[in-house]
Each structure stands twice: as structure tokens, then as C-alpha cells.
Amino acid sequence: MRETTRSKTQITTTNTSVMLAGFSGLERVLVGLFAFISVASASALTFALGAQETQCYYILIEKPKTSISYYFAVQSGGAFDIDYTIKNPRGEVIDSGEKKRQGEFVILADITGEYEVCFANGMSTFAEKVIDFEITFAENDHTDFRANLPDQPNAKPLQHVGNMLSTVEKIDEQLDNLQRTLQYYKTRNNRNHATVKSTESRIYYFSIFEVLLMVGMAFLQITVVQLFFRGARKQLV
């Protein structure tokens, strides 16, 4: 059995500070609106997990009430399944699963510290798995960010700022949905490709077995016919 492999990847949540000096009123608001998207941070990676191996990744949360969303999908290897475990900084298991092909969940980090996400390929004896893994975390409280929005020079609020903010949020949500859809089709494509290769391999070996069986049957028939005629000649003599 191989030793457990632990890959430590720290993702630290930080406050977003928007530098708005040198912009006009409308430009500063636009910059602030698009900076709103950057409040959510993400980390995506693809890694290979050997047989009987476990890899762990760590998320460093510095603020409580932070939403952690994660997505994973087994792209290739074996039966496309994996075991996973998520632990909080106290070592308590907050989510786990066995023989999962993919998953997408959201967890609320109540306490600060290092959260551990581990993937295990213990059920496989020789198959290596390739896994897509993405973590996104965002602070639920955006008051710090909103406090950085600039005041207007004429002390009057700009019109349609609320509509612009809503539009930016919808664009961000649609882009996120598009990304999830692309990931889904990528996973389906990889699995279908693996199924086609497996079927092709089975057809190849079945064809070889069929040819060998036909050759064996032909050889057996020839042998039986030869024995039959030899026995008939002995009876005549």
C-alpha cells in the first residue's frame, strides 16, 4: 500500500480594497460595481490521484460566516468514483461521501481556521484517477466593500446604480452557471470517451477470442475426421 500523499494548498480570504482615486463619479461607481465580483475568490485545479492514495487540500478562512462552495468531478480512471472528506479546524467531519463521481455543495464556515478537503482512492487497486476540483469562497457580509463606494461630488446619488448592481450580479451568476455547464459537459465527454475506448477494447479482445475459437473448432473437426477414417481403415483390414 502506498503512503498517503498530502498536498497542502492554502487559500486565504482577504478584504477587497478598491482604489478609486483619479476616476470620475460614474467611472468610480462602475469600477466599484465590477469589483463587487472579486469579493468571491476561487481556486481550480486538476490533479491525478494514484491507487491507494489520499490527497488533502486546505482552505484558510480568516472571517466567520464565509460561504465555501466546492465542486469536483472524476474525469477518468476506474469506475469514475472517489471518496471525499471535509473537516473543520477542530477536526470534525462536516461532509463526506463514498464512491462519488462528482459533487457540488455549499458549506457555511462558522469558525475561522484551516478547513481540510481530502480525496481518497483507497477502493482502487491499480487505477489512477484524474479529478477536477474547484473551491469558491465568499464573505456573506459585504459591508466593508460597500463602505468604500465613493460619495458623489454633487452630494446626490447617481440614478440607476441599484439596477447596475443587479445587472452585474446577474451577469456574474450567469457566467457561473455557464462555467458549471461547461464543466458538466466536459465530464460527460470524458466519461463517454472512456466508455467508447472500453467498448472498443472489449470488441477487439472478443474478436481475437472468436478467431481463436474458430481455429480451435476447425482443428478439432479435422482431428475427429482423421480419427474416424483411421478407425474405418482398421476395420476393413
Image: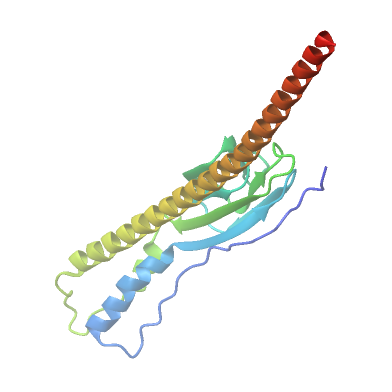
Left or right placement of residue 227 versus residue 199 in this view = right
Query: Farthest residue in the front direction?
Result: 237
Identify whether 107 is placed above or below 136. Answer: above
Query: Farthest residue in the top direction?
Result: 235
- Identity of the residue drawn at 17% across and 75% down: 158
The colour scheme used to paint the residues is rainbow
Percent coordinates x, y for residue 213 in the rendering: 67, 31
Query: Farthest residue in the bottom direction?
Result: 22
Quadrant into which the C terminus falls: top right
Asked whether residue 89 appears in the rendered view, the answer is no
Left or right placement of residue 153 versus residue 92 in this view = left
Asked whether residue 227 appears in the rendered view, the answer is yes
Q: Which sits in the foreground, 58 or 158?
A: 58
Q: Which sits in the foreground, 223 or 216?
A: 223
Percent coordinates x, y for residue 87 in the rendering: 63, 43
Left or right placement of residue 84 versus residue 20 in this view = right
Q: Quadrant of residue 177?
A: bottom left
- Identity of the residue drawn at 76% across and 18% down: 229
Percent coordinates x, y for residue 56 in the rendering: 68, 51
Percent coordinates x, y for residue 234 in the rendering: 84, 12
